[in-house]
Image (cartoon, grey):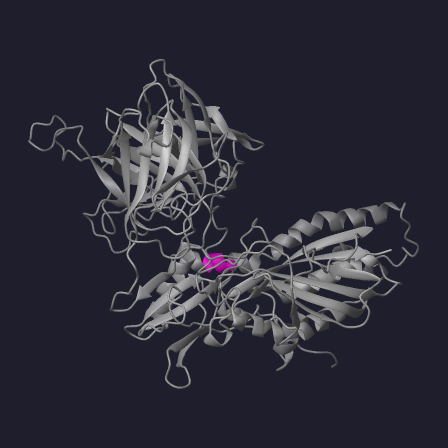
C-alpha cells in the first residue's frame, strides 16, 4: 500500500502545514479554510476531471457549450463554498449560544441637532423631548429623536471674547460660530480666566439656554482600576457660569453639562434669570446679553482645552424611533418548555429601552369585589440577561433585540404571565441601530414633528457610526501578561505577550508598563501604567494615529487589575501619545521595471516598517522606546524589488529637527520622499506618485526621555544620523512631558529631468 494515511502519526502536522489558516472571529483570531472558495479553483477542479469522466472531450474551445457551462458552474459555486468556509464560525456561534453567550445588540448613532426658530415675540420656543427629524439616505429615511427638552431662542451669537490675565481679547466669528479653533481660557488657563459669550436678540432667552460646544479631539484620560489608596490626581477645575445683567453679574444655574468640563464635545444647559438686560464687560465690548464662563478654582490636567465650534439651540439626539402602547403578540413555543413567548412588531430594538406592563391577575374576582383585586391594575416587569437564578415571584423577562421576541418565566425560573387577552403591552421601546445612522454633516434637515415657529434643524457634525449587531458572540481571550520586578528593585513592569494568540480579535496591543502616565518620571508606589495601542477601526483613517477609546482603556485596566496585577496594585491604562516623523529618501531604480510600481513599493515598505501594530523588525508592532535608525530604513528600502541604491535618506521629527545622512551623489534617477518645507527639497519633479504612511516610535522609559527640543531628543537622532536644520513648521503632541512619540511619513516618488 502506498500513499499517506490520514491516521498516521504525522498526518495532523502535515495537515496543519499544508492547510491554510485565515483570520477568524474566535479568541485565537484565526480559523482553517476548508475549501478554496474561488471560481478559478472550481473550474480547475472540473477541468482536471475531464479526462476521467469525458475522455472524448479532447479539444475544448471557448465557443464550446461545455466550456460555458464549466465557467458558469464556477461562478455559481463560489458563494456556496464561501458559506462552507464559515462553518467554523457557525460551530463557534452554536457553542457560545449553548453556553449562554448572547449576541451584542445594535447601538444607535448619537449626534447634536441645532434648531432654528422664529417666534413673533422673540421668546424661547419649547421643543419637547422626542421631537423627530429625518435625514434622507440611499437606503431610506433615518429618523433622529431628541433626548431632552430644548428651549430654543431666536437670539444669535454676536460676539466672543477671552479674558486672560485681566485683559479681554475678541475672537473672530464666522457664519457658524468661531472662525478658527481657540482656547476658551487662553493658552495658560488659570483661576480668573474666562470666556465671554455675547448674544443679540429682541428678547432674553428664558427659562433655559442650551449651548453646543465642539471640543478639539484629545486623547481620553487614563483609566485606573484596583488599588487601595487614591491616586494623587489634581482636582478638576471648578467652572462657574454668570449672566451679565446690565452692570452686575448674576449666577446662572448649570442644569446639564455633557462636555464634562470641556473634556468632550456636547451640550451645556443653563437656567437663566427672567430679567437679563444688555450690558458690556469692562466697557470694552458692545452692549449685548453676555454670558461669562470663568475658572473659579483648580486647573486643567494636561494641555489647555480648545474649541472649534460654539452654537446655540443645540440638543442631543439619537437615531431611533419610539414605539408606544403596543400589545405583544403571542408566539407558539415549539419545544413546549413552559416558557411564555411573545413578540414586538418593530426591530431592531435598542438595548434597555423596552418597558413592559402586565395586567395583574384578579384571582377569579372578575367583578373586583375584593380590595386590591380591581381590574385594570398592572405592574411593570424588568428585563434581565437570563431567567436562571430568578424565582417564581420575580417579574422578569429576557429580550432578543434582533428578532423582537420576549420570553417570560414558567413559574419556576421567573414569574409566569397571568392568562388573559392582550394583557401584556409594551409601554414604550425604541427601534434603530446599524450603520445607516452615520449620516454626513447637515444631512439631518427634515422636520418630521410639526411644531409652531420651528423653521429648521440641522446636524452641525457627522455622528459616529452606530454599532451593528455582532455576527457572532466574540468573547475575548485576554492577553497573558506577567509582572516582574525591574532590575535593582524598581517599580514592576507589565507587558503583554507578542504571540498573535495573546491578543483578542481586533483587540488592542499592550505596551510595556512604566509609571503613571500623568506623572512622567515620578515613581508612585503601587501604580503600574500600561500604554494601549488599538487597531484602526473599520472605516477609520489609516493616516491618523490609533488612539484607544475610554471604554477600551477601562476594559484593559479592569482586566489586568482583576487577572494579573498583585493585590493592592493600581493599574492605569492610557492611550499611547504620538509624535510625527517625516522620512525622505532618494533611491536609484532598476530601469527595466515600472517606475511607479517600484516607488509605491518603497513607500509601502516604509509604511509597514513604521506601523504601530505591524511594524518593527519582527512585524509585531513598532517597539515602545525603539529608535528610528538610518541603517534599518535603508535595509527596508533595499529589500524592495527594483531599488538598486539609496543615495540619500533624511528624517524629521515634530521638534523641527532634520536628521540627514548622505551617501553617493544627490542626483538619483528616482525618489521615494516626503515633501517637507526645507532647504533640501528636490527640484520640481515632472512625475509624482504619492503614498502615505503612519509610523510609531513610542518610548516609556527614562533612557529615551526625548522631549521636544531637549538634548536627549537630539542625541537620539545623532546616534543614527547627523542632524541638520529645517524650516518645517511642526508641533509636539501628546501628554506634557511624555516620553513617547509616533510619526507620520509621506512617501512620494519623483522623476527629475
Q: Is residue 92 magenta?
A: yes
Residue shown at 28% from the left, 55% from the top: 388
> Looking at the picture, how far across and down is residue 209, in whole percent?
32, 30
> Looking at the picture, how far across and down is residue 2, in whole percent?
75, 80
Is 498 or 691 nearer to us in this picture?
Answer: 691
Is 182 or 462 nearer to us in this picture?
Answer: 182
Q: Is residue 348 magenta?
A: no
Which quadrant would the C terminus be assigned to in this image?
A: bottom right
> Looking at the picture, how far across and down is residue 228, in whole percent?
25, 69
Q: Residue furthest bottom?
A: 488
Q: Is residue 224 left or right of residue 415?
A: right
Residue 707 seen from this side = yes
Residue 327 seen from this side = no
Rendered view: 334 above or below 286: below
Q: Quadrant of residue 253?
A: top left
Q: Quadrant of residue 720?
A: bottom right
Magenta range: 91-95
Residue shown at 60% from the left, 72% from the top: 717
Q: Is residue 472 left or right of residue 718?
A: left
> Looking at the picture, how far across and down is residue 571, in whole percent?
35, 68
Q: Residue furthest top?
A: 120
Rendered view: 131 above or below 566: above
Residue shown at 34% from the left, 32% from the top: 210
Is 30 or 298 nearer to us in this picture?
Answer: 298
Is 5 or 482 nearer to us in this picture?
Answer: 482
Rendered view: 590 above or below 544: below
Which quadrant would the N terminus be assigned to in this image?
A: bottom right
Amino acid at each position: 500500500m502506498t500513499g499517506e494515511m490520514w491516521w498516521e502519526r504525522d498526518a495532523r502536522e502535515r495537515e496543519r502545514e499544508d492547510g491554510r489558516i485565515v483570520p477568524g472571529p474566535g479568541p485565537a483570531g484565526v480559523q482553517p479554510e476548508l475549501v478554496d472558495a474561488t471560481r478559478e479553483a472550481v473550474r480547475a477542479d472540473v477541468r482536471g476531471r475531464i479526462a476521467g469522466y469525458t475522455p472524448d472531450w479532447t479539444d475544448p474551445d471557448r465557443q464550446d457549450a461545455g466550456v460555458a457551462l464549466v465557467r458558469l458552474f464556477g461562478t455559481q459555486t463560489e458563494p456556496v463554498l464561501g458559506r462552507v468556509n464559515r462553518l467554523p464560525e457557525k460551530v463557534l456561534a452554536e457553542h457560545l449560544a449553548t453556553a449562554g453567550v448572547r449576541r451584542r445588540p445594535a447601538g444607535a448613532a448619537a449626534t447634536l441637532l441645532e434648531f432654528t426658530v422664529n417666534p413673533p415675540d422673540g421668546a424661547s420656543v419649547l421643543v419637547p423631548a422626542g421631537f423627530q427629524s429625518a435625514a434622507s439616505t440611499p437606503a431610506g429615511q433615518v429618523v433622529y429623536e431628541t433626548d431632552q427638552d430644548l428651549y430654543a431662542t431666536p437670539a444669535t451669537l454676536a460676539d466672543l471674547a477671552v479674558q486672560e490675565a485681566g485683559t479681554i481679547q475678541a475672537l473672530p466669528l464666522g457664519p457658524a460660530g468661531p472662525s478658527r479653533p481657540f482656547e476658551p481660557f487662553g493658552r495658560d488657563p488659570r483661576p480668573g480666566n474666562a470666556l465671554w459669550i455675547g448674544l443679540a436678540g429682541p428678547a432674553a432667552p428664558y427659562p433655559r439656554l442650551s449651548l453646543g460646544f465642539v471640543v478639539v479631539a484629545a486623547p481620553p484620560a487614563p483609566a485606573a482600576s484596583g488599588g487601595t489608596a487614591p491616586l494623587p490626581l489634581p482636582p478638576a477645575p471648578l467652572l462657574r457660569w454668570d449672566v451679565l445683567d446690565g452692570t452686575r453679574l448674576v449666577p446662572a444655574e448649570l442644569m446639564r453639562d455633557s462636555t464634562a468640563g470641556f473634556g468632550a464635545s456636547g451640550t451645556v444647559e443653563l437656567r437663566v434669570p427672567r430679567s437679563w438686560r444688555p450690558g458690556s464687560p469692562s466697557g470694552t465690548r458692545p452692549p449685548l446679553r453676555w454670558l461669562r464662563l470663568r475658572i473659579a478654582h483648580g486647573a486643567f490636567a494636561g494641555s489647555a482645552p480648545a474649541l472649534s465650534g460654539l452654537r446655540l439651540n443645540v440638543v442631543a439626539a439619537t437615531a431611533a424611533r419610539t414605539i408606544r402602547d403596543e400589545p405583544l403578540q403571542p408566539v407558539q413555543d415549539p419545544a413546549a418548555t413552559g416558557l411564555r413567548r411573545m413578540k414586538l412588531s418593530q426591530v431592531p430594538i435598542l438595548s434597555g429601552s423596552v418597558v413592559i406592563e402586565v395586567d395583574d391577575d384578579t384571582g377569579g374576582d372578575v367583578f373586583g369585589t375584593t380590595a386590591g383585586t380591581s381590574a385594570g391594575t398592572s405592574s411593570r416587569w424588568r428585563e434581565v440577561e437570563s431567567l436562571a437564578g430568578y424565582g417564581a415571584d420575580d417579574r422578569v423577562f429576557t429580550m432578543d433585540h434582533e428578532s423582537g421576541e420576549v420570553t417570560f418565566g414558567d413559574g419556576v425560573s421567573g414569574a409566569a404571565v397571568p392568562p388573559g387577552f392582550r394583557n401584556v403591552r409594551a409601554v414604550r421601546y425604541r427601534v434603530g441601530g446599524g450603520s445607516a445612522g452615520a449620516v454626513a454633516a447637515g444631512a439631518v434637515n427634515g422636520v418630521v414633528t410639526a411644531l409652531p415657529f420651528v423653521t429648521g434643524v440641522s446636524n452641525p457634525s457627522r455622528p459616529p457610526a452606530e454599532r451593528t449587531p455582532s455576527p457572532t458572540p466574540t468573547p475575548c481571550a485576554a492577553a497573558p501578561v506577567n509582572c516582574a520586578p525591574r532590575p535593582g528593585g524598581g517599580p514592576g513592569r507589565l507587558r503583554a505577550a507578542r504571540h498573535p494568540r495573546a491578543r483578542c480579535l481586533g483587540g488592542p496591543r499592550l505596551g510595556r508598563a512604566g509609571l503613571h502616565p500623568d506623572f512622567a518620571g515620578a515613581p508612585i508606589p503601587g501604580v503600574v501604567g500600561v500604554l494601549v495601542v488599538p487597531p484602526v477601526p473599520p472605516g477609520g483613517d489609516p493616516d491618523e494615529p490609533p488612539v484607544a477609546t475610554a471604554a477600551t482603556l477601562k476594559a484593559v485596566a479592569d482586566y489586568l487589575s482583576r487577572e494579573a496585577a498583585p493585590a493592592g496594585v493600581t493599574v492605569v491604562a492610557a492611550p499611547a501619545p504620538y509624535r510625527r516623523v517625516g522620512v525622505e529618501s532618494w533611491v536609484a531604480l532598476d530601469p527595466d521595471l515600472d517606475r511607479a510600481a517600484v516607488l509605491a513599493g518603497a513607500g509601502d515598505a516604509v509604511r509597514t516598517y513604521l506601523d504601530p501594530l505591524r511594524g518593527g523588525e519582527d512585524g509585531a508592532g513598532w517597539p515602545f522606546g525603539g529608535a528610528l535608525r538610518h541603517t534599518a530604513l535603508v535595509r527596508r528600502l533595499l529589500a524592495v524589488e527594483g531599488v538598486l541604491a539609496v543615495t540619500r535618506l533624511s528624517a524629521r521629527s515634530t521638534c523641527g529637527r532634520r536628521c540627514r545622512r548622505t551617501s553617493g551623489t544627490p542626483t538619483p534617477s528616482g525618489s521615494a520622499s516626503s515633501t517637507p518645507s526645507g532647504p533640501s527639497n528636490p527640484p520640481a519633479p515632472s512625475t509624482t506618485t504619492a503614498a502615505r504612511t503612519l509610523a510609531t516610535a513610542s518610548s516609556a522609559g527614562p533612557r529615551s526621555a526625548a522631549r521636544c527640543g531637549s538634548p536627549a531628543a537630539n542625541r537620539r537622532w545623532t546616534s543614527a544620523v547627523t542632524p541638520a536644520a529645517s524650516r518645517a513648521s511642526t508641533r509636539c503632541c501628546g501628554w506634557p512631558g511624555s516620553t513617547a512619540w509616533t510619526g507620520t511619513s509621506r512617501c512620494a516618488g519623483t522623476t527629475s529631468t
